[in-house]
Each structure stands twice: as structure tokens, then as C-alpha cells.
């Protein structure tokens, strides 16, 4: 059996695959190159860099499983894969702590202007008044999406003594209460929160869940965090809300188009950004790589996928 790994994967995951199969690692392939290659493989292992389009799937005549070392499968045409009988599996647990920690790091960095102050001091400025921050204690954090990552964010924000409100159509009152989260609608979060962070997958129902209508409801100076997926928050609406002063800051790890070099959001001083680093820790990358490698081994040896 042959496995193609088309995004970088930690050695621990590669070792598991190599013990069982012939493994080729080819990163940075164009769609055409992937279409040309894929027919020879029984499994494809990806992160977020590879776009597994309908064309790729049509050419994947021997493929049994697409393994995503990470959570989001928005870079895979899941419908086309399912129609062709190809399993799409992900590794939803391995990077949830890293993603939650990054969210908190971004919220704190934004609140204390750490990236701006760092750049300023390194350019030989000593401007203590310019970087006056705010405490998060006692502020209301609205969490849109209380799945694995949103719940971990809630636990950490509760340690920071924030008031928590959250929206998730799939969570029970009991579970929300255990997390110290008051359940609310998206409208209520927009009206009441001082900080809003999104932790949903990017699907039809969540695309642009924060749009002009929601920004209009928000408190002046609200701070926005997106360490989930570009497109959950409308980038155009966020740009308008930053321009008008309605939004007092944003911390963004993800963008509709990555890398976002021409994205107008990058021009605001009070928008801090990282290059999709939520899952980029040593721990998370070992976890997701080994989890997905085990899924591939299971499926290619006649077993089931746990997270398909
Ligand atoms: C994920 O979906 O797992 C994260 O965004 C990290 C990644 O894209 O690799």
C-alpha cells in the first residue's frame, strides 16, 4: 500500500506510516501535480496546505482514506470524496489545547498591546503611555462555538475571572453550566460581550456568522478574536467596523485567503495577527500526526476510522 503525505507531518506520525506502508512525502504540490500523482496512492495525509478538490478526488482511483492531521476539513471536497467511497478522517483532539492556548495568548496580547510595544521598543522607542492596556478580569467574553476548543477556551478564561457567555446549538445547559458559561444567542453575545471569540468549523451555517448586522449590535470598543477559520467572521464587515471605530481591536490567526498579504485587515495598528499558528506547537503536531497515522493504518488494514 502507498501513502502520500502532501503537507509537513511530524516524524512520529511518519514513523508509524513507514512501519506499515510505502510512504512518499511531497509537499507544495500544485493541483495539477496532485491530480497526476494521486492515482497511485491508497491514502493521502494532509494538513491545511493541500486543497483536495473534486478534480483531485476524480483522479484518486485507488484512494481509500484522506487523513487530515488537524481539525478542519474545509480544504477537502468531502461530498466528492464520500460519493467516491473515500473516507475523510481528521484528528480533532490533538491540537485543541494548543488552539485554546493561542486564543488566550492572542486575547492577552491584544489587551496589553504586546506586539505593538515589542516592535516599538525594538525600534529604540520608550513609549510607556502609548501602550496603555486593559485588564480582562470582569470583562465579558462571548464564545461562539463551545465544542472541544471553545470549551477549553472557556476553562482558561474562567481562570482569568472573565464572565462567560456562549452560543452553541449542540451544547446542553448542564455542560455549559459546568464550564461556567451562560448560554446565549449570537445576537445577545454581540450586544453584551466585551470580547468575542469564534470556535466553530467553517460550514454554510457559520460562514460570516459575525457580519455587518452583528457588528451593528456590538458595544463600542468590542474586541474580536478569530483563531478558528477565516470566513467565520466577515472580513469586509470587520474592516468596516474597525474603520468606523466600532471594533476596538482584533486578534486574527486565520484568514479567508492565506497567506493574507493583501488583506486590508493587516493595515490596522490595532489588529494583531499570526500566520495560522493555533496548532503550531511541538505537542499538537506530534499528537495530530500520530492520531491520523493510526487512523490510516486502521483503514488500510481493514479496520475502521474513529473520526470519519
Ligand atoms: C486545524 O484545523 O487543525 C488547525 O487550523 C491547524 C491546521 O490547519 O493545521
Image (cartoon, grey):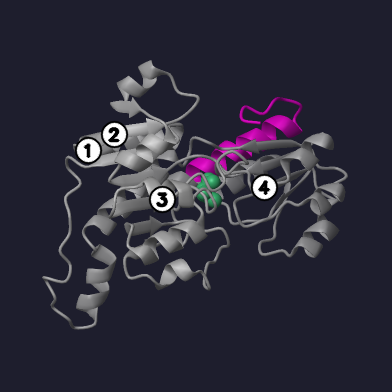
Which residue corresponds to the image point at 58% horizontal and 62% vertical from the top-left?
257
Q: Nearer the viewer, residue 192 or 152?
A: 192
Q: Is residue 301 magenta?
A: yes
103 to the left or right of 109: right
297 to the left or right of 126: right
Q: Is residue 183 magenta?
A: no
Range of the magenta residues? 286-308
**Residue 162, disc:** 1
Q: Earlier in the sequence, mark 2 or mark 3?
A: 2
Question: Given contact means CB atoms under 8 Å apart, are the residues at marks 3 and 1 in contact?
Answer: no
How far is the residue under mark 3 from the one under mark 1?
21 Å
Crowding at dot 2, Cα within 10 Å, few <14 / some 14-19 / many 20+, comes out as many
How far is the residue under mark 4 from the one under mark 3?
38 Å
- Which structural element holds mark 2? strand
Is 38 located above or below residue 68 in the figure?
A: below
Q: How many marks?
A: 4
Q: Nearer the viewer, residue 246 or 65?
A: 246
- Which structural element holds mark 1? loop
302 to the left or right of 267: right
How far is the residue under mark 2 from the one under mark 4?
37 Å
The residue pinned by badge 3 equals 215
Is 190 located above or below residue 129 in the figure?
A: above
Question: Given contact means CB atoms under 8 Å apart, are the residues at marks 4 and 3 in contact?
Answer: no
Q: Main secondary structure of the magenta part?
A: helix
Residue 246, percent from left and from top = 33, 57
The residue pinned by badge 4 equals 45
**Residue 43, disc:** none
Q: Earlier in the sequence, mark 4 or mark 1?
A: 4
Tag nearer the camera, 4 or 1: 1
- Which structural element holds mark 3? helix
- Which structural element holds mark 4? strand
Amino acid at each position: 500500500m502507498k501513502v502520500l503525505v502532501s503537507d509537513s507531518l511530524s516524524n512520529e506520525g511518519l514513523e508509524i506510516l513507514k512501519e506499515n506502508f510505502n510512504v512518499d512525502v511531497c509537499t507544495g504540490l500544485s493541483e495539477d501535480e496532485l491530480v497526476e500523482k494521486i492515482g497511485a496512492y491508497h491514502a493521502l495525509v494532509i494538513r491545511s496546505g493541500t486543497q483536495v478538490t473534486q478534480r483531485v478526488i476524480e483522479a484518486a482511483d485507488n484512494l481509500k482514506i484522506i487523513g487530515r492531521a488537524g481539525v478542519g476539513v474545509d480544504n477537502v471536497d468531502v461530498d466528492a470524496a464520500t460519493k467516491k467511497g473515500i473516507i475523510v478522517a481528521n484528528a480533532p483532539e490533538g491540537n485543541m489545547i494548543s488552539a485554546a492556548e493561542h486564543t488566550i495568548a492572542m486575547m492577552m496580547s491584544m489587551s496589553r498591546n504586546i506586539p505593538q510595544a515589542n516592535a516599538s521598543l525594538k525600534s529604540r522607542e520608550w513609549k510607556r503611555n502609548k501602550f496603555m492596556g486593559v485588564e480582562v478580569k470582569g470583562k465579558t467574553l462571548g464564545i461562539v462555538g463551545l465544542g472541544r476548543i471553545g470549551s477549553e477556551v472557556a476553562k482558561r478564561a474562567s481562570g482569568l475571572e472573565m464572565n462567560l457567555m456562549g452560543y452553541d446549538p449542540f451544547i446542553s445547559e448542564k455542560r455549559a453550566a459546568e464550564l461556567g458559561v451562560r448560554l446565549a444567542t449570537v445576537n445577545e453575545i454581540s450586544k453584551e460581550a466585551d470580547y468575542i471569540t469564534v470556535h466553530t468549523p467553517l460550514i454554510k451555517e457559520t460562514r460570516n456568522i459575525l457580519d455587518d448586522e452583528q457588528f451593528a449590535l456590538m458595544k463600542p470598543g468590542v474586541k474580536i478574536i478569530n483563531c478558528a477559520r477565516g470566513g467565520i467572521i466577515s472580513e469586509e464587515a470587520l474592516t468596516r467596523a474597525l474603520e468606523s471605530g466600532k471594533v476596538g481591536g482584533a486578534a486574527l490567526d486565520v484568514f479567508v485567503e492565506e497567506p493574507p498579504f493583501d488583506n486590508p485587515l493587516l493595515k490596522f495598528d490595532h489588529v494583531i495577527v499570526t500566520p495560522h499558528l493555533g496548532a503550531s506547537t511541538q505537542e499538537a503536531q506530534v499528537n495530530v500526526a500520530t492520531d491520523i497515522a493510526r487512523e490510516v493504518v486502521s483503514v488500510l488494514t481493514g479496520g475502521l476510522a474513529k473520526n470519519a
